[in-house]
Image (spheres, rainbow, N blue to C red):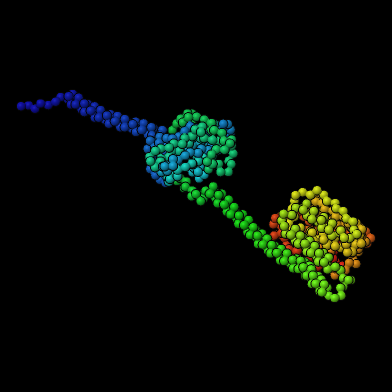
Amino acid sequence: MTPNLARPDENVSLLSRLKHGVTVCVLCILSAAGLTARAETNAAASLSNAPNIYVDYGQTPPSYNAVKRATNGLGCWIWAQQVLDKQTIYLWRAFQVPQSDPVVHAQLSISADNAFTVWLDGQEIGAGSDWRTLSSYELSGKLAPGTHVLAVEGFNDCDKAGVIVGLRLKLADGRILNIPSDTTWRVVPRPVSGWQTAAKPQEGWLPARFIARLGQGPWWAIPTTVAHIQGSLPEPVPFWRTSRFQFILFTGCAVFVLAGLYLLIQLAIQSKTHKFLQIERDRIARDIHDDLGSKITQLLLTGEASQIRRHSPVPDSASADPVLQMCSGARDILATIDEIIWIVNSQHDTLNDFAIHACKYTERFLESSLIRFRFDVDELPGKKLTQLARRNLFLAVKEALNNSVKHSHATELTVRIRLEGSAFKVIVEDNGIGFDGRQVNPERNGLNNVMLRMHEIGGSSEIISRPGEGCRICLSCPLIKPRFHHFLSKPAHPEGAAGLPADRETGLPAKPMRT
């Protein structure tokens, strides 16, 4: 049987079919590769349109959804009422965190055209200068319940300007609290001290101006770049570090110090007053002993002498009537008692009471002399004299009257009492023979005592006399005296007899004396 062999044309056809199948397979492979490459190219093109997200500290870039989450809570673009080139504005917003739930997490997203700096409760969170970038600050920590302040400083280089902000707070109970940028924000006219922490807006802080919504041109709907930055919330300030507590503490310390100083001054004054009262008691005891005691002793001696004369067989007709002497002595004792009572009694401490008492004493003292007297007393207000001033001034007047009666040979005497400004003045003037100060006996202490008494009460005395022209003694006592002046001033220490520098020739105070 002869074998069945194929014809040459059939072999060629078979080879052609084989080549065609290989070609189709190659084309299919190439087509598949082309579709894959196109898909990869399209994927790469679509990926190139997605935001370029980066995270500090080498963290893995998040997905596209992270970009959407970063824009959650953003408000609108805001600015001041007027937009200028090279302009800096200051935005302020206060918000409340519920008392029951603190903030456990916070996310602050912000962008500005052209630059910004942001603060939370006065603590700087961050800054940026590219409006195409959205800065997202992941803030860890807890934000205490109460009032908090978000502050932004924005800068515009030229053309249009805006700031967009979103603060997203997660509370402890899971609730979300959003603080977006809107017209409730305030524009601070100038960066006054503490504006980043002010709890309430001040007068003149106008509302921010709405510029554009999120996604409205010329700004982005989705930022080109999102910068995720790790940060921390401002730590709660302890109450002892707050300005209010420090102010209260400082005020309390100042009040305490002032109260302590006041009490110390009062204690010193009380101690000095007690010492003064002790001195006054000693002085009254001395006056009673020296003046009243001597007069009562004299009265007693007069009575005993009268008793002896009554039993004497030969009466002494040349001696004065002892009964009259006893009556005169009793009157002197009563007058002395009246003077002591008047000096001690605080109900007679006005200027008018002093004038009345001085005039009565002058009238009683001069009634047995040949000197005519008159009074020139101005109308006096209801001001008062201290006990020491009344005593020293009255004793100085007594000494002046005594000198006039004993030494002046005067026929007329005038007592003038007046108030000149803050000085209460008593002037005793006579028309006697006068004297020369250089010829005064230095052993006589009358005028020295006048000077000393006036100097002790902070006053002054002026003695004007010339031979043949009478004598004029002017006593001046100040009324307006600070309460603590006597406490703070140095006590008077006598120098010589008068407590003032004494003249070497006369022994009298040199400065007050004029002859």
The relative height of residue 325 versus residue 153 in the rendered view (above or below) is below
- For this rendering, which residue is in front, 158 or 401? 401
Name which residue lies at 43% across and 35% down. 73
Name which residue lies at 52% across and 48% down. 242
The relative height of residue 50 versus residue 419 in the rendered view (above or below) is above
Q: In which quarter of the image is the C terminus?
A: bottom right
Q: In this view, does 98 lie to the left or right of 32?
A: right
- For this rendering, which residue is in front, 173 or 435? 435
Instruction: Please identify the residue farthest to the left as the structure is shown.
Output: 1
Q: In x, y percent, where is residue 17?
A: 21, 26
The relative height of residue 286 versus residue 386 in the rendered view (above or below) is below
Q: In this view, does 271 lie to the left or right of 452?
A: left
Instruction: Please identify the residue farthest to the bottom as the structure is shown.
Output: 313
Residue 452 picture quarter: bottom right
Name which residue lies at 17% across and 24% down. 10
Q: In which quarter of the image is the N terminus?
A: top left
Q: Is residue 325 left or right of residue 288?
A: right
Residue 191 picture quarter: top right
Q: In x, y percent, where is residue 258?
A: 61, 54
- For this rendering, which residue is in front, 413 or 126? 413
Instruction: Say if residue 231 shows up in the picture.
Output: no
Q: In this view, does 202 lie to the left or right of 325?
A: left
Name which residue lies at 49% across and 49% down. 239
Q: In x, y percent, where is residue 329?
A: 80, 65
Instruction: Say if residue 197 shows up in the picture.
Output: yes
Q: In x, y percent, where is residue 264?
A: 63, 59
